[in-house]
Image (spheres, rainbow, N blue to C red):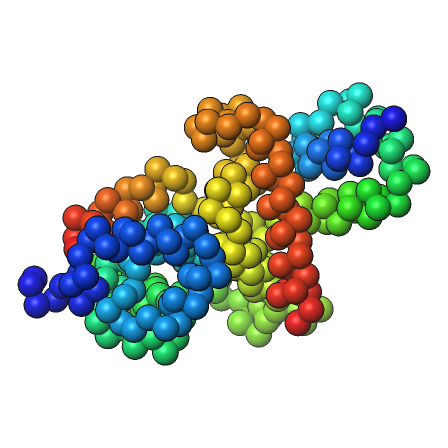
């Protein structure tokens, strides 16, 4: 175990926490710091806050099971920790984590295949038994149907939004996520975060305005 | 007559279906005479439908805390 402890541990945990506070209090320093920081200064503590939702969205688009997706994200963080010393700082942290997650998704499907004792990948093209024996050619997607493209596009859109949420000040992002994605009631959010409703609506307003601007820049312009 | 700030607040509430009937009427009336707020309301509503379409998912704060704990115990 001792050998596999990543180098970033060397500067001590309390120092890490200090770094973290400085970094999260100012998102612009975060970017410059991650660029200049080498492998030994990866910030696993901030990973969960910064990337968990992004990775989760990515995973759930591929395994379509919340529980499994959550486990895959967790495994990704573990693997990231273990191989933190291999992180060369060439790619952004998130890109690097996504690369690990991709492997995890593949592994997941390998495992679930071997569990069922399958020696090969079998695809069932049809779920209804009365269509059995029909020609595959008849099942070719209607080219005028854009459903598939929509699904892909919606996933990319989801990731773009998550990306933008990640750029918001921490508390704004949290409030927006709780309200919009998790659909928690105003009352419950106020209780949990100890704020009053007018505070909440101000934060929601700022978050929404910022997100619209961010999406306009990153999504609709390309 | 309501202010633009108030109109924006009601508009945001309306995105989460939390605006009362009276509030919505006030907003409607304001939008008749205020171009800026009309534009904002249109964009805000579009943004809501984009969010719906994107099928956003997220982990709860509790799940994230658990993740952090497990990461600490591992490292």
The one of B60 and A14 positioned closer to us in this rendering: A14
Q: Is residue A207 above or below residue B27?
A: below
- Left/right of residue B28 with respect to residue A10 in the rendered view: right
Total count of labels:
0
Q: Is residue B53 above or below residue B29?
A: below
Looking at the image, which residue is at 31% across and 41% down? B65
Looking at the image, which residue is at 30% across and 60% down? A43
Q: Where residue B64 sits: x, y (%)?
A: 34, 44
Q: Where residue A219 sits: x, y (%)?
A: 64, 64
- Left/right of residue A135 with respect to residue A31 in the rendered view: right
- Left/right of residue B58 with respect to residue B10 in the rendered view: left
Looking at the image, which residue is at 43% across and 50% down? A25
- Left/right of residue A151 with respect to residue A64 in the rendered view: right
Residue A121 in sight in this render:
no
Residue A3 in sight in this render:
yes
Q: Quadrant of residue B29?
A: top right
The one of A87 and A22 positioned closer to us in this rendering: A22
Looking at the image, which residue is at 55% across and 57% down? A164
Q: Where residue B70 sits: x, y (%)?
A: 22, 47
For the C terminus of chain A, give its image quadrant: bottom right
Q: Where residue A36 sits: x, y (%)?
A: 37, 73
Q: Seen from this angle, which residue lies furthest right?
A: B33
Q: Seen from this angle, which residue lies furthest left?
A: A2
For the N terminus of chain A, give its image quadrant: bottom left
The one of A44 and B46 positioned closer to us in this rendering: A44
């Amino acid at each position: 175990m001792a050998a596999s402890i990543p180098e970033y541990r060397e500067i001590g945990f309390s120092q890490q926490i200090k770094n973290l506070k400085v970094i999260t209090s100012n998102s612009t320093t975060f970017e410059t710091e991650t660029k200049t920081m080498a492998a030994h200064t990866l910030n696993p503590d901030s990973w969960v806050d910064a990337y968990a939702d992004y990775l989760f969205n990515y995973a759930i688009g591929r395994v379509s099971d919340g529980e499994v997706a959550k486990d895959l994200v967790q495994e990704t963080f573990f693997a990231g920790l273990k191989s933190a010393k291999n992180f060369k700082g060439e790619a952004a942290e998130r890109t690097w984590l996504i690369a690990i997650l991709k492997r995890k998704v593949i592994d997941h499907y390998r495992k679930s295949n071997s569990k069922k004792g399958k020696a090969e990948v079998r695809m069932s093209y049809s779920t209804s038994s009365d269509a059995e024996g029909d020609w595959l050619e008849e099942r070719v997607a209607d080219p005028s149907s854009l459903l598939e493209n929509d699904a892909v596009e919606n996933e990319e859109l989801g990731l773009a939004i998550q990306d933008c949420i990640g750029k918001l000040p921490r508390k704004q992002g949290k409030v927006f996520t709780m309200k919009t994605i998790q659909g928690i009631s105003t009352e419950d959010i106020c209780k949990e975060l100890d704020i009053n409703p007018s505070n909440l609506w101000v934060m929601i307003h700022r978050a929404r305005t910022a997100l619209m601007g961010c999406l306009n820049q990153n999504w609709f312009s390309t | 007559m309501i202010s633009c700030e108030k109109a924006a607040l009601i508009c945001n509430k309306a995105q989460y279906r939390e605006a009362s009937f009276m509030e919505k009427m006030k907003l409607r009336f304001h939008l008749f005479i205020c171009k800026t707020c009309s534009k904002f309301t249109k964009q805000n509503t579009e943004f809501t439908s984009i969010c719906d379409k994107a099928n956003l998912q997220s982990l709860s704060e509790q799940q994230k805390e658990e993740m952090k704990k497990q990461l600490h115990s591992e490292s």
